[in-house]
Amino acid sequence: MTVMLPKEVKKELKGRSYDVVIGIPSYNNESTVNHVAKIVDQGVQEYFNGKGLIVNADGGSDDKTRENFLNQKTASDKVAYIYKGVAGKGSAMGSVMEISDLLEAPVTIFVDSDLRSIEPWWVERLTKPIVDEKASYVTPYYVRHKYDGTITNNICYPLTSALYGQRVRQPIGGDFGVSLEMIKKYLSKPAQIWKEDIARFGIDIWMTTTALCEGNKPVWQAALGVKIHDVKDPGKQLGPMFKQVVGTLFALMKENDRIWLKREGETKDAPIFGDIPNVIPEAVNVDGDNLKKAARSGMSEHWKFLTSILPIELHSALESVKKSGTLDSGLWIKIVYEFACLYRNPDLQARLIQSLVPLYFARVASFVEETDGRSDEYAEKIIEKQLEEFENQRWYLKKRWKA
Ligand SMILES: Nc1nc2c(ncn2[C@@H]2O[C@H](COP(=O)(O)OP(=O)(O)OP(=O)(O)O)[C@@H](O)[C@H]2O)c(=O)[nH]1
Ligand SMILES: [Mg+2]
């Protein structure tokens, strides 16, 4: 049974066979989607002898996204449709999974429709570890500016790696290679999940975490260089995305607690496929003072709630965060672990996410202070050090989780 794939598309595709399916989720991307289609088509010609299907799963764009996609000349077959179900990137990707499952395509790629830096060889990098039967799932490995990807650097990367045992640098990068094995696992989950944040921006962290926990083979990373895509206004966009990503991450911790509670030993690097291109990412500007201001006022706003849920030993340190608008990694990690435990209570979830935002701003403000005027390599070292602290503090999480 398909849930997100329209019936008529299913009928049209039934009985066909492809070596690779490329899914492009879109919503109002008329100026970039044809470029993405053109480049992946070149990749399919080069690495799959043209035996690929390029899919545009659209969210009902009111511009010419689908039209431009279909008008782009390609040697590969193409199909475009409006998916069914909850509006969001996850539903778009779920509908592509239903195609891959229907056609038993051995490997599927997802690439965003607003990508400008995509190259034909991305098709090879995202698929070869799967085709060679070394990986169940491939995440993108980008070269990013030190201030790009702050949710990734401070939450998704360290928490996911420390819990599930493989260091995956871009767990929510957006561009993935997925084996048929994983596609079938995703589709075997209760249909209810496609009504939640997984149907929106929670999809990436869910796919990656599920691959780490349930894949028969390891997760690999594909060296892709820089990711240039449409920039969004963080003030407008951060709220829903933060909620969907971090909420899904915490929910997954409960789902998979038997796995991470018993896991001992070292966290391994996920292998990187391909040489890392020697490129310099575009600078991302972050206003540290503004972050501190937002952190201070958000902390005041949520002060009562924060002090009612967090252990008393942390209150004086929190008091300093409220004054300075900055937050060191040691306290940040304890807070993240406390929040993850509390998130098991459904009545608290909405408040928890809202009140985590100012603390996250304070953590980013500190990171900006620590790395101001320093190189991306230096900033990367700080992120790695923070990951190690997340790993070393797992005992704290385990203790609090069982309490
Ligand atoms: N079908 C569909 N696609 C969506 C929806 N929202 C986003 N997308 C697509 O998902 C991809 C990623 O979305 P973006 O908005 O670029 O988000 P992002 O690049 O992950 O996030 P930022 O780093 O914050 O820009 C793009 O190809 C979007 O067109 C949606 O509601 N429906
Ligand atoms: Mg984007």
Image (cartoon, grey):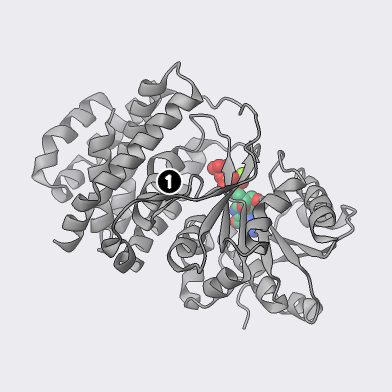
Asked if 52 appears above or below 278 in the picture, the reply is below
What is the quadrant of residue 390 in the picture?
A: top left
Q: Residues within 10 Å of mark 1 (few under 14, many from 20)?
A: many
Residue at left offset 57%, top offset 61%: 135
Side of 236 relative to 363 (left or right): right
Residue 112 is left or right of residue 339, and the answer is: right
**Relative to 20, does residue 188 appear above or below in the rendering?**
below
The quarter of the rendered structure image containing the N terminus is: bottom right
Residue at (35, 31) in percent of width and height:
294
Q: Position of residue 281 (x, y in %)?
A: 61, 29
Confirm whether residue 346 shows in the render: no
Which residue is at the far left?
Answer: 312
Q: Type of residue at label 1? A: Tyr
Q: Is residue 377 left or right of residue 366?
A: right
Give me the residue at 63% from left, 79% from top: 2
**Residue at 52% across, 65% down:** 217
- Among the 4 quarters of the image, the one containing residue 11: bottom right
Q: Position of residue 302 (x, y in %)?
A: 24, 42
> Helix or strand or loop: what does disc 1 sit on?
helix
What is the x, y in percent for residue 225?
64, 37
Q: Is residue 77 visible?
A: yes
Q: How many marks overall?
A: 1
Is 59 left, or right, of 221 in this rendering?
A: right
Tell which of 84 and 389 is nearer to you. 389
Using the image as rendered, state which of residue 35 and residue 170 is in the foreground. Answer: 170
Which quadrant does the C terminus fall into? bottom left
Which residue is labeled 1 in the image? Answer: 157
Q: State the residue lying farthest toward the top.
A: 373
274 and 236: which is toward the camera: 274
Give coordinates of residue 171: x percent, y percent.
49, 50
